[in-house]
Image (cartoon, rainbow, N blue to C red):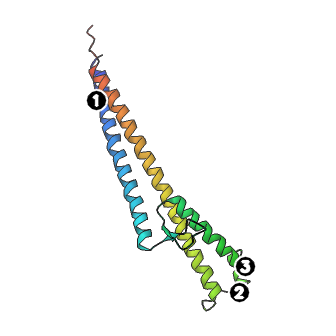
Amino acid sequence: MGRLGRIAGAVIMALGVLAIVIGAVFVFQGFSKNNLIVERMQVEKVSLAIDPNDPSTLTEIQTGAQAQGAADIISSHRRAIAPSYQDLLAGGRFNSNNSTHLTYAQAMNLENYLYLAVTAFGLVQVVLGAGAFMVVTGIALGLTGLVLLRLPVKTA
């Protein structure tokens, strides 16, 4: 193997190191953002009764699945008030003095907050997966570059 092979090995190793560094940043950011979402939900005391037989025992939401479950429950309760926002208003306007209108609007806000959390948790999973893939790819590239550098030089 000649000089070109050694240069290729060094370039591949450098790309491997770069992939590992970028992958590590993705993984760090993924965990960081996941912790931020959970922390913000704890501050707001967003919780869910997981056991339908014991609705008084609440568990803080810490995963996308829990947020999805809570949002779906709120959605079903909201739709019991009115199937849609237009049905609630019945051709009229929102009335902030009407407790049914206020309850419906608050349910929509909390439901949207939880669905946004579901999206955020999902994005965190994508970032963590991409970061892990970059780290594995970086290791493979680094090892490939190392093999190329260690191949014996053929003399003509």
Report helix, strand or loop for mark 2.
loop
Could you tell which of marks 2 and 3 lies nearer the N-terminus? 3
Could you tell which of marks 3 and 1 lies nearer the N-terminus? 1
Contact? badges 1 and 2 (CB < 8 Å) = no
Relative vertical location of residue 145 with respect to residue 15 in this rendering, above or below: above
Residue lying at 41% horizontally and 69% vertically, measured from the top left: 40
Q: Amino acid at mark 2?
A: Gly
Q: Amino acid at mark 3?
A: Asp
Q: Quadrant of the C terminus?
A: top left
Image quadrant where residue 39 sits? bottom left
Q: Nearer the viewer, residue 102 or 49?
A: 49
Callout 1 crowding tier (Cα within 10 Å): few <14, some 14–19, many ≥20: some
Q: Position of residue 122 (x, y in %)?
A: 50, 56
State the CA–CA distance, disc 3 to disc 1: 67 Å
Q: Quadrant of the N terminus?
A: top left
* Residue 94 shown left or right of residue 67 in the figure: right
Callout 2 crowding tier (Cα within 10 Å): few <14, some 14–19, many ≥20: few
Q: Amino acid at mark 1?
A: Ala
Relative vertical location of residue 66 with respect to residue 127 in this rendering, above or below: below
Residue lying at 57% horizontally and 65% vertically, measured from the top left: 51
Between disc 3 and disc 1, the foreground one is 3
Q: Nearer the viewer, residue 65 or 94?
A: 65
Residue for badge 1: 10
**Residue 92, numbered circle:** 2
Residue for badge 3: 87
